[in-house]
Each structure stands twice: as C-alpha cells, then as structure tokens.
Image: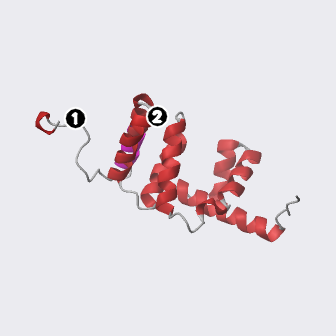
Amino acid sequence: MSRELPGPQEEAGRRSRGIAAYASQFGIEPSEVVAHMTGLLGARMAEEAIQAAGGGAWEADELSLRDRSIAVVAALITQGGVESRLRGHIRWAVEHDVSPSALEALVTLLANYVGYPRASVAMEVVRAEIAEMGLSFDGPPAGPLPRDAR
C-alpha cells in the first residue's frame, strides 16, 4: 500500500493554514508565527507543528471549533504538566464560544476522572487566563452545597 506524498501546492496550503491557526491561538500576526514557534520549539519541530496544525483536524465538518476546543482543553488537562499550552487553548476556546463558566464546569467534571490535584492546577490556569482576558464566570460559583441541598 503506497501513499502519495503531498505536492508542493498542498504543502503550501497546509503550512498557510497552520500559520493562520497558530496566529489565532497565540494572538500574533501570521508573519510572527514561524519566529515565535522556532523560539519555542526549534526550527525542525516548529515546522512539524505548523504542518500538523494545518491538517484537517481543525477543519472537518463533524465537529465545530467549539467542540474541538473543548476536546483539546480536556486532553491537555488530562495530560497535566502542560500549563503553558493550556493557557493558549483556553484563550482559543473562548474565541470559539466556550464560556468561562463552561470551562469551569469542564474542569470540575474532569476532577472526578483525572484527580483533584491535576484538576486544581488546571482550574488555577483557567481562572487566571479568564481574569487576564477581563472576563468573569457567569454561572453560580462552584463550591460546597448548602447543608439543606445535600
């Protein structure tokens, strides 16, 4: 089974989509993406990441950008130890119409599955990013239930 390699035009389109995705995620100009990513990852890995981001994972019709953002934030929280990546994806999730209260609910749900230490670190990151964006949580505060509601 042989697989055809992408042609130069397809590679250029994929690279352009990857640059656009990272520009949006990091809130920088497309012209700054390669230098930014190279500074973070080195030239080889930066190019791999740009090419991967330009693939179809963020474009298929079955999931909305909002759905994809929720999935990625959940995956990053589950991995743990990737707070710097989580920060960018929290911001991108908000751009993709995930509300601060939905992010808070997601982290609270994940606490039951990934453990409270990992979820509490993620919640600190979520709350800090939301505050830095000048947003607030629009739902009821999370916390213990009143005694009469238990």
**x then y, percent, for residue 51:** 71, 57
Q: What kind of residue is marked 1? A: Pro
Please state the horizontal and vertical placement of residue 61, each as a whole percent of the image: 57, 69
First to last magenta residue range? 124-132
In this rendering, the answer to whether 61 lies above or below 57 is below
Visible residue check, residue 128: no
Left or right of 12 on screen, residue 100: left
Name the residue type under label 2: Val
Helix, strand or loop at disc 1? Answer: loop
- Residue 44 visible? The answer is yes
Residue in the foreground of this view, choosing between 122 and 143: 143
Question: In which quadrant of the rendered view does residue 95 lie?
Answer: bottom left
Magenta stretch: dominant secondary structure: helix
* Residue 75 located left or right of residue 101: right
The residue at which mark 2 appears reads as 114
Q: Residue furthest top?
A: 117
Asked if disc 2 and disc 1 are in contact, CB closer than 8 Å, the reply is no
Q: Residue at x 49, y 40 (%)?
A: 77
For the point 22% across and 48% down, which residue is it?
Answer: 140
Residue shown at 35% from the left, 46% from the top: 104
Q: Position of residue 33 (x, y in %)?
A: 64, 56
Reading the image, the residue beneath label 1 is 144
The percent coordinates of residue 67 (x first, y second) are: 48, 58
Magenta stretch encompasses residue 121? no
Q: Residues within 10 Å of mark 1 (few under 14, many from 20)?
A: few
Helix, strand or loop under label 2: helix
